[in-house]
Image: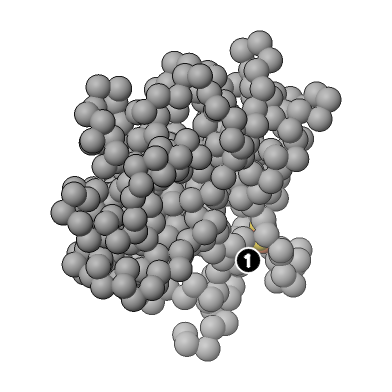
Amino acid sequence: MGSDKVYMEWRPEHNARYPFSNQAKEFISQHDLTLESILTSRTFGMARNRAKERVIEAIEEGRIGGKWASRDAHPSNQLTEIVSYPLARMIVSCVDDEFLHRRYALAEAENVSSFLHNEDDMDLVLGVGNELGLVGSTAGKEITVNFLDFIDITRDMSAKEWKLVNQDLRGGRVHLDPSKFIRLLKEKAFQEVLKDLPLEVNQDIKRALSGILEDVTEKLEVLKEKFVDQDLGEVEEGLFPPCIKELIKKQAEGKNLSHEARFALTAFLHKIGFNQEQIIAIFSRSPDFRVDLASYQIEHVIGKVSSTEYTPPGCGYMKTGGICHKPDDLCGADWMTHPLTYYSYKKKRSPQD
Ligand code: SF4
């Protein structure tokens, strides 16, 4: 991942904050650790526990708290924190579940983002970018990145604010304010963490981690039973218009939905009779699902927060906002002006009715 450039301000706690970095890998290699000792020795019992905690926090909270990553953390705890990262990657790789891999990668990326927002040294932020393979340069108060890197990283970010045409592009470089640059780094961190998952894990690794794997699998099943695998009753997703199907698909793949897209999906589902739990079940298919945030956003749209119940947008708005997706023959009818009309038309003609 990234270049081998060394940053003067890179300190031991930065290895704990950014354990994917080459610097952290080098730090680990200086300690002469073997896979066997990390997996089985008592010395690394705390690191294994911390790795389990990392994965369980990712499952339950959708983010990972930084533990021994402060400047005054004891060096042995910092080492524990750093070693827990490759161990956590081994743990999720032992579980054959793509949803877990994506949810874990997103949680690690969330962690990187929250650390970066608290760094007061912009050189360090640029250094983390370099470690992730995104080279930024300062231009006054802004950060610039190569436009090809920008296009590559934002490929799954559908909000208008991330389209290249809406960027300040000069001489092949995109100018960003620091918070947008950090948002880009978060996406890049997600892609980099996910890229090699699942790692190849042999039976010895699975055996050594078996106790942890039982706990992790149990937590994953609890989350899925509670939200993801909810019975959606009589709603027939097959009758949804192409735009709504696409939003649900993107949601399940963990792709970034714009605010407008989330709004359109929530309001549509509410109008056709989904209750709050069922809407949460759809949103929970996304690996970055957080029940508190999703509930708040849904309650807002369906009128529980402000008493204003929003109407889902029509085809005109969906087209302008880039949310209309591969309209089919039915979409092409003169009278087709709303995704709800599409659904009710199909439903009336559905053989099950
Ligand atoms: S035409 Fe309307 S219903 Fe069809 S995909 Fe586009 S927005 Fe959806």
What is the quadrant of the N terminus in the image? Answer: top right
Looking at the image, residue 350 sits to the left or right of residue 38; the answer is right
Relative to 315, does residue 117 appear above or below in the rendering? above
Residue 170 drawn at (x, y percent): 80, 24
* Other-residue count near label 1 (Cα within 10 Å), few / some / many at <14 / 14–19 / ≥20: some
User: Which sits in the foreground, 292 or 80?
Assistant: 80
Name the residue located 35 percent from the left edge and 35 percent from the top edge: 16
**In the figure, 87 relative to 132: above or below?**
below
Kindly identify which residue carries mark 1: 242
Residue 104 % position (x, y):
39, 54
Evaluate whether residue 90 shows in this view: yes
Q: Relative to residue 145, is residue 179 drawn left or right?
A: left
Q: Nearer the viewer, residue 249 or 344?
A: 249
Which residue is at the far right?
171
**Callout 1: helix, strand or loop?**
helix
Q: State the image quarter where residue 330 is shown.
A: bottom right
Q: Amino acid at mark 1?
A: Pro
Residue 109 visible somewhere in the drawing: no
Image quadrant assignment for residue 78: top left
> Which colour assignment does the render follow?
one colour
On whether ligand 1 comes within 8 Å of the CB at mark 1, the answer is yes
Report the front residue among 119 and 68.
Answer: 68
Q: Is residue 266 above or below residue 162?
A: below
Furthest residue in direction left, as rendered: 42
Residue 80: where, in percent of width, then height? 26, 42
Residue occupying the point 32% across, 68% down: 205
> In percent of the image, x 24 and y 53: which residue is there?
48
